[in-house]
Image: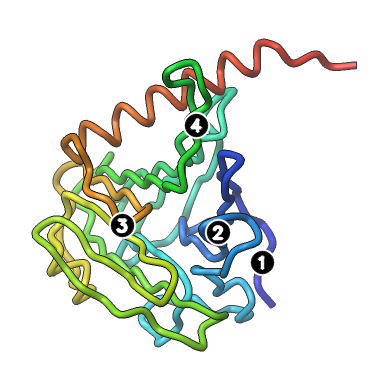
Amino acid sequence: MSSLDLGVVGNGTYGALIDKWARIVWCCLPRFDGDPVFYSLLNGNGAEEGDGARGYWGIELEGAASTRQYYRHNTAILVTEVTDCDGNTIEITDFAPRFTQRERIFQPMTMVRRVRPIEGTPRIRLRMRPGFNYGAEEPAVTRGSNHVRYVRSGLALRLTTNAPVTYLLDETAFNLTSSMSFILGPDETLTGGIEETARQFEERTEDYWRKWVRHLALP
């Protein structure tokens, strides 16, 4: 049976469930009532490293031994620290952009993941394995210089990243030496740089949630 010890990120447009190893195991797109693009939560222990499971998105640290997961203070930004047997550690930050833009709430069908090394020389593997119709359909996959498209009739998702696209598609392990960002959303070209866009989205989302929290009143 799948563990229900899960983190959640969302922005009012969609939501995603993330396990303690920072694998996205449930997410319906383009809305809460849409098709589950990530669905391995339904597969029991499904998303195990190295097997043929589908329906999840993992940023996996080789030899992972322990994790620590928490929300950044007074925000809906989820942070997962994963450490291997030798003490090498990565930090994965997950959030759904939500902030005020042009006097309106900006809450796109966009998911942002950022990973950075925080200790030693961690070696990671990217596993991006979406599906459609509860896994009955696999997406058609096309690639560009800095993006991958996952397409089915009626829905096309684009993952834009500054990680090596070949490593992503081949699930090749590599040493993580600097921050990398992943922006999953509609099949549209980013207008700005990948790292800069992810950073701005994170800063503005963090600012939004902290301002929102100030207006909460406990009974």
Q: 12 above or below 155?
A: above
SS for callout 1: loop
Cα distance between the residues tagged 2 and 4 = 22 Å
- Specify the quadrant that holds the N terminus: bottom right
- Specify the quadrant that holds the C terminus: top right
Please name the colour scheme applied to the rendered image: rainbow
**Residue type beneath disc 3:** Asp
Q: Nearer the viewer, mark 3 or mark 4?
A: 3
Task: Determine the residue positioned at 44% across, 80% down.
Answer: 54
Badge 2 is on which residue? 19
Cα distance between the residues tagged 3 and 1 = 32 Å
SS for callout 2: loop
Badge 3 is on which residue? 187
Look at the numbered discs 2 and 1 and tell me whether their residues touch, using CB distance below 8 Å. yes
Label 4 CA crowd tier, 10 Å (few <14, some 14–19, many 20+): many
Look at the numbered discs 2 and 4 and tell me whether their residues touch, using CB distance below 8 Å. no
Badge 4 is on which residue? 98
**Residue type beneath disc 1:** Ser
Counting residues from the N terminus, which is met first, the one under dot 3 or under dot 4?
A: 4
